[in-house]
Each structure stands twice: as structure tokens, then as C-alpha cells.
Image (cartoon, rainbow, N blue to C red):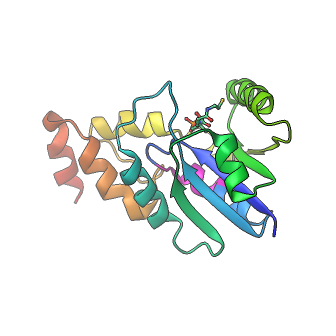
Amino acid sequence: MRTLIYPGTFDPLTRGHVDIARRARRLCDRLYVVVLRNANKRPAFDVAERRDMAARCLADLDGCFVEDYDGLLVDYMVERGAVAVVRGLRSESDFRYELEMVAANRLLYESFESILLPSSSALALTSSAIVREVAAYGGDISAMVPDEIQDEVARRLVRPEYRHRLEVRT
Ligand code: PNS
């Protein structure tokens, strides 16, 4: 059984994340999508919300399990017996960040391995941060966020003074 892990903050999960998860699933027998803490971020959604939204969006993907974990990625990898982690790569700046994470993780766990999957071009410029910004102004996030969680994300993140823009669309 080859197990891969797809870790992230997923605040919230985007269509780009779903694309990476689906492609990563084809490379292994079991894929764990895990919601972790990033010490540099203060998420808009709490861990349980992010995990539940991700689970809803990936419910139809056999052999894919969504969890959350409060600890080091390398410890989670060992617990799950994973051979590598998968991360999506959108840009050169992502690449630099990923290399830094690989270096840190390898100092913690010498067998650490990472597979970097280039984002599909149409989704390359989506990010959870852009989703949060557009949603705050009541903008249309349907091209960025999976159908299953669009309403929840839009309603949770819209600022009160822009709420009328959601009503216009529904
Ligand atoms: O989606 P993100 O924010 O780029 O994901 C980063 C994440 C959550 C994978 C990373 O911050 C992480 O692995 N957090 C868990 C704690 C840990 O192991 N930190 C050391 C990694 S350098």
C-alpha cells in the first residue's frame, strides 16, 4: 500500500486543491488530505470547519481520507506510514517556499520526500487568500471554490456591508 499525504491549511479548500488531490490519488493507493496548522497564518475558518469542508468536496474520491492533525507534518507522515507528501506548485514563489519546507522537514526526518505537482493552468492563480478577499466583498467565487462549499464560504466571509451582493445572485 503506497500512502501519500496532501497537507495544507486549506482555508478554505479551492478548486485548485481538489485538482491536486485528484491527481495525487492516481499516484498512490491511499491519500490522506490533512488540515494542519501553519504558524504564520491566522485562518478564517477553524480546523474542524476546514476539515469538514474538505471532506465534503472530496467525498466521491475513493481511497482519499480527510483528517486534521495538531503537530508536525513529519510525525503525521510516520503515523500514517506515508512515503511522501504532495504539494501543488503554482508559481516560482511557491517553489521557493516549498524548497524551504522540504529542507526543514528533512532536518526533522531524513526520509522525508515531497512530490510537487504543477497546478493545472486554469487554476494556477487561485489561492485561498484570493478566495477570502473576493468573498469578503461579496464577489463571485464560483470559479474558485468547489460547488459543495461555495455558499458556506461566501456567507461566512462576506462583510456585512456587502451582504446584499450575495442576495442579488441567489
Ligand atoms: O497550505 P500551507 O499553509 O502552505 O501549508 C503549510 C503546512 C500546513 C503544510 C505547514 O505549515 C506544516 O507542515 N504545518 C505543520 C507543522 C509543521 O510540521 N511545521 C514544520 C514544517 S516546515
Taking the image as shown, residue 116 lies to the left or right of residue 49, namely right
Residue 11 figure quarter: top left
User: What's the residue at 18%, 52% (across, down)?
Assistant: 168
Front one among 48 and 55: 48
Q: Quadrant of the N terminus?
A: bottom right
Q: Position of residue 19 (x, y in %)?
A: 63, 56
Q: Within the magenta stretch, is there residue 14?
A: yes
User: What's the residue at 27%, 35% (across, down)?
Assistant: 137
Q: Is residue 120 above or below residue 39?
A: below
User: What's the residue at 75%, 58% (across, down)?
Assistant: 81
Q: Is residue 113 above or below residue 3?
A: above
Q: Is residue 148 above or below residue 142?
A: below
Front one among 138 and 96: 96
User: What's the residue at 58%, 51% (across, down)?
Assistant: 17
The stretch in magenta equals: 13-20
Q: Quadrant of the C terminus?
A: bottom left
Residue 105 figure quarter: top right
Residue furthest to the right in view is 111
Q: Is residue 39 above or below residue 141?
A: above
Q: Main secondary structure of the magenta part?
A: helix
Q: Within the magenta stretch, is there residue 63?
A: no
Q: Position of residue 80 (x, y in %)?
A: 69, 58
Quarter of image, ligand 1: top right
Q: Position of residue 156 (x, y in %)?
A: 26, 46
Taking the image as shown, residue 34 lies to the left or right of residue 140, namely right
> How many numbered marks have been drawn onto this rendered protein structure?
0
Taking the image as shown, residue 51 lies to the left or right of residue 49, namely right
Q: Position of residue 130 (x, y in %)?
A: 45, 35
